[in-house]
Amino acid sequence: MNPVFSELSSLSRAEKLQLVENLWDDIAATPAALPILDWQKQELAQRKTKYLQNPTIGSNWEDVKARIS
C-alpha cells in the first residue's frame, strides 16, 4: 500500500473532506492546466447543437436545484 495513502486513511472524515476541498481549490486555480480532450469538445458541440435546435429541451438552474434538493 502507498505510504501516503496509509497516512491519509488515518485522518478523520472532516479532515479528509477539508483535504479534498483544498486539493480541488488548488486544481481549480489553474483551469488552463486541465486539457479539454477532443471527445469532450465533440460532446459539448453536439449538446450545443441540440440545444440551439430546441432550447426547450434543457432545464434552468432553479428547476434542476429544486429536483435535487
Image (tube, helix red, strand yellow):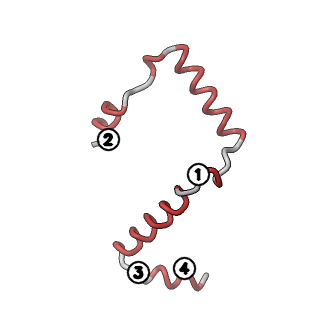
Q: Residues within 10 Å of mark 4 (few under 14, many from 20)?
A: few
Mark 1 Cα-neighbour bin, 10 Å: few <14, some 14–19, many ≥20: few
* Crowd rating for badge 3 (residues with CA inside 10 Å; few <14, some 14–19, many 20+): few
Residue drawn at x 36%, y 73% as measured from the top left: 13
Q: CA distance from mark 3 to mark 1?
A: 28 Å
Return the disc, 1 or 2, that comes first in the chain's sequence.
1
Circle 4 or circle 1, nearest the eye: 1
Hey, what amino acid is under mark 1? Pro
**Circle 4 is placed at which residue position?**
5
Which labelled disc corresponds to residue 31? 1
- The residue where tag 2 is placed is 68
Mark found first going from the N terminus, 3 or 4:
4
Q: Which mark is residue 20?
A: none
As helix, strand or loop, the secondary structure at mark 4 comes to: helix
Residue at figure coordinates x 57%, y 25% from the top left: 48
| Alpha carbon distance from label 4 to label 2 | 33 Å
Q: Which residue is mark 3?
A: 11
Residue 19, horizontal then vertical, whole percent: 44, 71
- For marks 4 and 1, give the CA distance: 26 Å
Residue 28 point in image, percent of width and height: 52, 55
Categorize mark 2 by other alpha carbons within 10 Å: few (<14), some (14-19), many (20+): few
